[in-house]
Image (cartoon, rainbow, N blue to C red):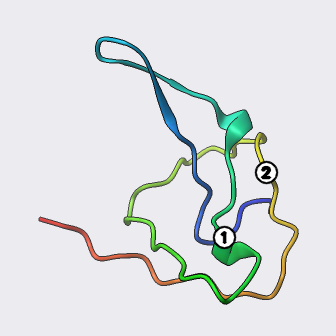
Amino acid sequence: RGTYPAGRFVALVPVGPGRYRLDFNRARNPFCAYSSAYPCPAPWRGNAFAAAVAAGERYQGGGLAAPAPAAEVP
């Protein structure tokens, strides 16, 4: 528990040629986690970590349904 069912967002920050910083402390929920007025992006299947990441903004629940995962692109 702690992650909205549709996932969280993290920005890749370029730090050099071919290098990026990924700061999970800045992970955030999509707007749809807080209001059904916003469309919810569907994550790609397989776009997930097997391990829990205990960082960033936590989801406290709100009764909103998560979207179905998007189909894989061949």
Residue neighbourhood size for the residue with mark 2, other residues' Cα within 10 Å, grouped as few (<14), some (14–19), many (≥20): some
Q: Which residue is mark 2?
A: 57
Would residue 74 be found to the left or right of residue 13 on screen?
left
Q: Residue at x 70, y 68 (%)?
A: 4
The image shows residue 45 at horizontal and vertical percentages of 38, 66
Picture layout, residue 73 above or below residue 70: above
Q: Quick one: label 2 or label 1, which is nearer the N terminus?
A: 1
| Residue type marked 2 | Glu
> Residue 19 falls in which quadrant of the image?
top left
| Residue at screen point 30% across, 11% down | 17
Report helix, strand or loop for mark 1. Answer: helix
Front residue (pair 37, 8): 37
Vertical placement of 7 versus 67: above or below? above
Residue behind mark 1: 31
Quarter holding the N terminus is: bottom right
Given residues 1 and 22, the one toward you in this image is 22
Q: Is residue 36 left or right of residue 71?
A: right
Q: Residue 40: where, in percent of width, then height?
A: 54, 78
Classify 34 as above or below 50.
below
Q: Secondary structure at mark 2?
A: loop
* Quarter of the image that includes the C terminus: bottom left
Query: Could you classify mark 1 by the number of other residues whose Cα lies within 10 Å: few (under 14), some (14-19), or many (20 or more)?
Result: few
**Contact (Cβ within 8 Å) of mark 2 with mark 1:** no
- Mark 1 residue type: Phe
Q: Is residue 40 left or right of residue 62?
A: left
- Give the vertical position of 38 relative to 42 (above or below): below
- Please name the residue shown 79% across and 51% down the image: 57
